[in-house]
Every structure is written in structure tokens, then in C-alpha cells.
Image (cartoon, rainbow, N blue to C red):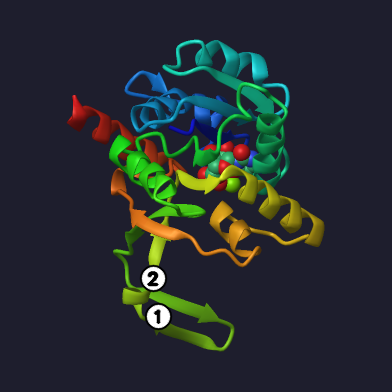
Amino acid sequence: MEPVVALVVAAGSGTRLGGNVPKALREVGGRPLVLRSIEALAEGGVDRALVVVAPGLEPAFEGVLADAPVPSACVAGGAERQDSVRAGLAAIAGDPGLSRSVFVLVHDAARALVPAAVVRRVIDALRAGAVGCIPVVPLVDTVRRVTPSGSTVVDRAELCAVQTPQGFVRARLEEAHRVVAERGIAVTDDAAALEVLGETVALVEGSREALKVTEPIDLMVAEAVVRSRS
Ligand code: CTP
Ligand code: MG
């Protein structure tokens, strides 16, 4: 079967979470978020991982990655998430061990508790022929569009929240990020980058447990999820 590499983005500043430890090295249930992310990805079928970290933090992350269940290395990221993804894709392409991978799963280190079943669904969709695949969950809140002239309710039935890992045929995602960078387009996820090429993405069922640790309350929820699993 085609090897699958995970590109784990962990180069953000974690401003909303606060604290003086990089977000991806913050622990939940005694284990760093980045390590829990790689464990879930490996359990779901990923063969190797490349972690994109803030420049200068490579040594701190390398120490943690020694405990990962699949071979894992790290590389420096950029100012925006899409810059970090691009840096990671370039590093994968330049590494003979990683560039054998036909598929790449881009994952937010902050979504450390993604169930392995979600990872498996994404990989299965790629193996079944999808060029891109993203996990989604229904929205639970009522949503309003707010503009200077007032606000209107939006039909929630047509909306969903998008999670990671997002899976892609690696060569197509590389091309997408090249075009996005060349045209100066800002994207907040990789599916949006792929769509710039005119491709469509497949949707699979995500999970509330794949919450993105963003604010302090998310760490509390994550602790509770880990406790509930043991
Ligand atoms: N990320 C990245 N490179 C960036 C910005 C973000 O690799 N330049 C990563 C983060 O490390 C995170 C994921 O993208 O795993 C999603 O971003 P977010 O949850 O917003 O994390 P941060 O940007 O670190 O947090 P904040 O926005 O609160 O500063
Ligand atoms: Mg951010």
C-alpha cells in the first residue's frame, strides 16, 4: 500500500492559549499535544511524520519526537499557517525517505485527540480515489451573519465545521500551495488551497473529540476527554 506521511503543523504562536510553553508541547494527561497527535495519526495508518515548528524550537521538539511511535522529524515553519504547510511540503519533497509518500495528511498539532477512526476514514477516501478529503462535523450553535448594516440568521443545515487531518494526493497539494503562494491568496486550510486548482474535496465524518485546543477552556475539555478514555 502507498505510504502516508503526516505533516503536523505546530509553528503557531499559541497566543489565545497563553502560557510560556509552545502550545504543541503543552501536556494533556501528562503527554504533549504534538505526541498525542502523532500517536493518533500512527494508529490511524500514517507511516511517518514531519512536524513544522517555530524557528529555533527544533531542539525542544526533537526531544519529544524521540518517543513517537513512527519515525518523526521536524522542520522550521513560517509566519502564517499556509507558509508552515508550504515549508513542510518542501521538506517532504526533499527527503528521500518521505518523498515516497503518495498521500499527505496535514494535521493541526492542536487537534491532539482526533480519534484514529477519523484518520482512517480520511486515508480510506484517498485510497478510494479522492484527491482531497476533509473531516467535518455539524454546527451546534445557531449562526448569524453580522455586517455593519445588521445581522441575519444563516441556515445552519447548509454549514459544517472543518477539522484535520485533511488528506491529499501529495503532488496535487504541492501544486495547490505553489499556485496559492504565487497568486498571493490567503487560505485558512488546505482544502481551500486545493480548490484553487479546480479540484473538489471529499467529506468524511469528523469528531467532536478532534477539537482544536485554542483557548484555556479547550485544555480543560481535552483533559476530560483523556480521562474518559482511560
Ligand atoms: N500554525 C503553524 N504556523 C503558523 C500558524 C499556525 O504551523 N504560522 C499551526 C498551529 O501551530 C496550530 C495550527 O496551525 O497547530 C492551527 O492554528 P491555531 O490553532 O490558530 O494555533 P496558533 O496559531 O498557534 O494559536 P493562536 O492563533 O492563538 O496564536
Ligand atoms: Mg493561529
Camera sees residue 96: yes
Counting from the top left corner in percent of width and height, residue 113 is at 35, 35
C-alpha gap between disc 1 and disc 2: 9 Å
Q: Amino acid at mark 1?
A: Val
Which of the two discs, 1 and 2, labels the residue nearer the N terminus?
1
User: 22 or 149, which is in the foreground?
Assistant: 22
Give the secondary structure at mark 1.
strand
Which structural element holds mark 2?
loop
Most distant residue in the right direction: 182
Mark 2, Cα crowd under 10 Å, few <14 / some 14-19 / many 20+, is few
According to the image, label 2 marks what residue?
159
Quarter occupied by the N terminus: top left
Q: Is mark 2 within 8 Å of ligand 1?
A: no
> Relative to residue 226, is residue 111 depicted above or below?
below
**Residue identified by numbered label 1:** 154
Q: Is residue 138 left or right of residue 48?
A: left
Q: Residue 115 has which mark?
A: none
* Residue 213 falls in image quadrant: top left
Q: Residue at x 73, y 28 (%)?
A: 94
Circle 1 Cα neighbour tier, 10 Å, few/some/many (<14 / 14–19 / ≥20): few
**Is any atom of residue 14 visible in this view?**
no
* Residue at horizontal 39 percent and vertical 82 percent from the top: 153
Question: Residue at left 41%, top 45%?
Answer: 127
> Hey, what amino acid is under mark 2?
Leu
Q: Are marks 1 and 2 in contact (CB under 8 Å)?
A: yes
| Pair 1/2: label in front | 2
Tell me where residue 195 sits by quadrant: bottom right
Where residue 2 sits in the image (x, y, percent)? 48, 34
Count every numbered label the image shows and give the total.
2
